[in-house]
Amino acid sequence: MDNCLLCQPFDLDDQQIVLENKTCLYIQSPQHQLILEGSELIIPKAHRPSVFDLTQEEWNDTYSLLADAKKYVHRRLKPDGFNIGWNCGEVSGQHIPHAHPCHPSFCG
């Protein structure tokens, strides 16, 4: 979608693509823009309104990228734990209608 913020991740100021695979990106914004330190997003490259719209391949790639992201965050921040969440629909807190199913952040 042309007007979807996450469909154009390269257009975001200071956005970094940390990891990627065939169908998904693991992106990071500068810390002053993040909700929690160490928090990043795993997003499908194709526009999908919610996590329920992911293809099986995107689910598999999300899982694989989540495992790689955990290693990456662990090396950088050595957290005691992780939070991972899915917000689906505006009422649940999803403000950008592009699936960003994993929001790994560290605890501790």
Image (spheres, grey):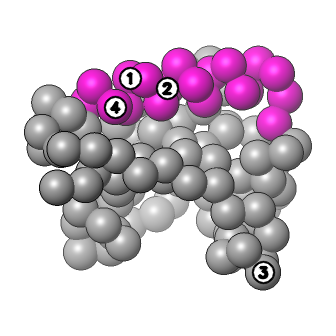
* Horizontal side of residue 26 vs 23, given as left or right: left
User: Where residue 46 is drawn, which disc sits there?
Assistant: none
Image quadrant holding the C terminus, namely: bottom left
Q: Eyeballing the image, is 80 above or below 39?
A: above
Tag 3: amino acid: Val
Which numbered disc, 3 or 1, marks the residue closer to the eye? Answer: 3
Magenta stretch encompasses residue 86: no
The residue that appears at 28% across and 25% down in the rendered structure is: 71
- The image position of residue 50, as x and y in percent, is 79, 53
Q: Of helix, strand and loop, which one carries label 3? A: helix
Label 2: which residue? 65
The image position of residue 58, as x and y in percent, is 73, 27
Q: Nearest to the eye among marks 3 and 2: give it.
A: 3
- 2 and 1 marks in contact (CB < 8 Å): yes
Please tell me the numbered disc located at residue 68. 1
Horizontal side, residue 30 vs residue 24: left or right: left
Tag 1–tag 4 contact (CB < 8 Å) = yes
Q: Amino acid at mark 1?
A: Asp
Pick the front one: 96 or 106: 106
Q: What's the amino acid at mark 2?
A: Leu
State which region is magenta: 54-72
Q: Which residue is mark 3?
A: 91
In this view, 22 is above or below 14: above
Task: Say left or right for 51 vs 101.
Answer: right
Looking at marks 3 and 4 on the same chain, the residue that comes earlier in the sequence is marked by: 4
Q: Which mark is residue 70?
A: 4
